[in-house]
């Protein structure tokens, strides 16, 4: 996700934040949701297919995360922090958007205003 200053506007930043949140949490939530649908409903081929597709998507995301930590040469447990990291990046971007909209930015006890 790009920084706020490099985007084409607030709409693009919000769109990227939503994509980031989906990328962060859907691979974790979707298989659990699909499996609970299989066991709480009448199991049929559509529910099982949804569960299999959710697991396949989560496996692809796990492979992507594992290749990232291998490329960056960081310890394996950091793969567990990717979702939280994307969420924090989204929160920082949204705060930056809000400060830009309001017109004031505070940094190191100094306040900057937009001209």
Image: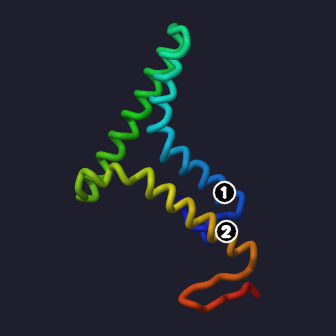
Instruction: Describe the colour scheme in one phrase.
Output: rainbow
Image mark count? 2
Residue at image location 44% in from the left, 50% down from the top? 83
Horizontal side, residue 67 vs residue 31: left or right: left
The picture quadrant where one finds residue 103 is bottom right
- Residue 13, percent from left and from top: 64, 60
Residue pictured at 32% horizontal, 50% vertical: 79
* Residue 22 vertical placement versus 17 (above, below): above
Q: Residues within 10 Å of mark 1 (few under 14, many from 20)?
A: some
> Whole-percent x and y of residue 42?
54, 8
In this view, the residue in front, 109 or 64, is: 109
Residue at which label 1 appears: 14
In front of the other: 42 or 56: 42
SS at badge 2: helix
The image quadrant where one finds the C terminus is bottom right
Q: CA distance from mark 2 to mark 1?
A: 9 Å
Q: Are marks 2 and 1 in contact (CB under 8 Å)?
A: yes
**SS class, disc 1:** helix
Q: Is residue 110 left or right of residue 63?
A: right
Establish if 92 lies above or below 110: above
Mark 2 vs mark 1: which is more N-terminal?
Answer: 1
Query: Label 2, on which residue?
Result: 97
Q: Residues within 10 Å of mark 2 (few under 14, many from 20)?
A: some
**Residue sitting at x 71%, y 64%:** 9
Residue 3, given in percent of the width and then of the height, sits at 56, 67
Residue found farthest to the front: 40
Q: Is residue 53 left or right of residue 81?
A: right
User: Residue 34 at what x, y percent from top left?
Assistant: 50, 24
Residue drawn at (35%, 47%), measured in percent from left and top? 65
Quarter of the figure with residue 100: bottom right
């Amino acid at each position: 996700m790009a920084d706020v200053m490099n985007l084409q506007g607030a709409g693009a930043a919000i769109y990227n934040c939503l994509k980031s949140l989906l990328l962060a949490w859907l691979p974790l939530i979707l298989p659990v949701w699909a499996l609970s649908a299989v066991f709480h409903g009448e199991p049929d081929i559509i529910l099982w297919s949804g569960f299999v597709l959710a697991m396949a998507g989560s496996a692809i995301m796990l492979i992507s995360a594992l290749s990232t930590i291998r490329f960056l040469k960081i310890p394996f447990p950091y793969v567990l922090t990717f979702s939280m990291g994307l969420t924090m990046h989204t929160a920082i971007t949204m705060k930056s958007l809000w400060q830009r909209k309001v017109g004031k930015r505070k940094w190191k006890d100094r306040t900057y205003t937009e001209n």
